Image (spheres, helix red, strand yellow):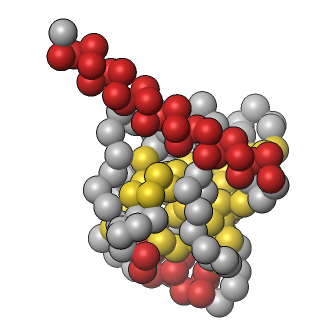
Amino acid sequence: MTPNRAASPHAATPPENNLTALFREALRRGRQLNIRARGHSMRPLIPDGSIVEVRPMSGRLRIGDIVAAQRGQRLYIHRVHAVEPMVLLWGDGNRRPDRSFQDSDILGRVHRIRTPAGWHLRLDTRAATASGQLIVRFVQLRARLHALRHLS
């Protein structure tokens, strides 16, 4: 499997045990990766089949960033909701956050998205950063409202 082929935005188990190690090494060497996102956890921003451009981490991790993270042999493309004391990731379309990640689990930051419909979205702009932070608030509020609805 090559970086341009399927890797899940939610959680896929790659067929090769060393695939995420190859991703980590390529990013460590300063290379960008184009990964085909599979799944619906980041909809509507990242529809199934989108190509996400992942670049090595530069600067601090910020709330609202979309990152590639590894847990075991699984690759996640999810949004950062908290950075202290551990990194909390949450797919925009999911009802619950992922378990916390260590800083060392973060492979790189998503800089660009190409959707199957042909849209090209840059995430390295001020507007994208502000939008990401608003989406974090919206996703958390949606989860609280969902929980309240199920209490009554």
Left or right placement of residue 41 versus residue 47 in this view: left
- All told, the count of numbered labels is 0
Outermost residue toward the left in this view: 151
Residue that appears at 43% across and 76% down? 103
Quarter of the rendering occupied by the C terminus:
top left
Q: Is residue 27 above or below residue 149?
A: below
Task: Tell me if I can see residue 22 in this picture.
Answer: yes
Residue 58 horizontal side relative to residue 140, left or right = right
Vertical comparison of 105 with 82: above or below: below
The percent position of residue 63, horizontal first and vertical second, equals 55, 56
Percent coordinates x, y for residue 128 in the rendering: 75, 48
Instruction: Name the spot of residue 50 as percent of width and height, x first.
Output: 65, 44
Q: Residue at x 47, y 52 (%)?
A: 81
Task: Pick the residue in front: 102 or 12.
Answer: 102
Which residue appears at 60% of the width and 57% of the height?
65
Task: Place residue 13 in its image quadrant.
Answer: bottom left
Side (left or right) of 86 relative to 36:
left
| Image-quadrant location for residue 74 | bottom left
Name which residue lies at 61% across and 74% down: 60
Task: Between residue 128 and residue 72, name the one nearer to us.
Answer: 128
Q: Quadrant of residue 82?
A: bottom left
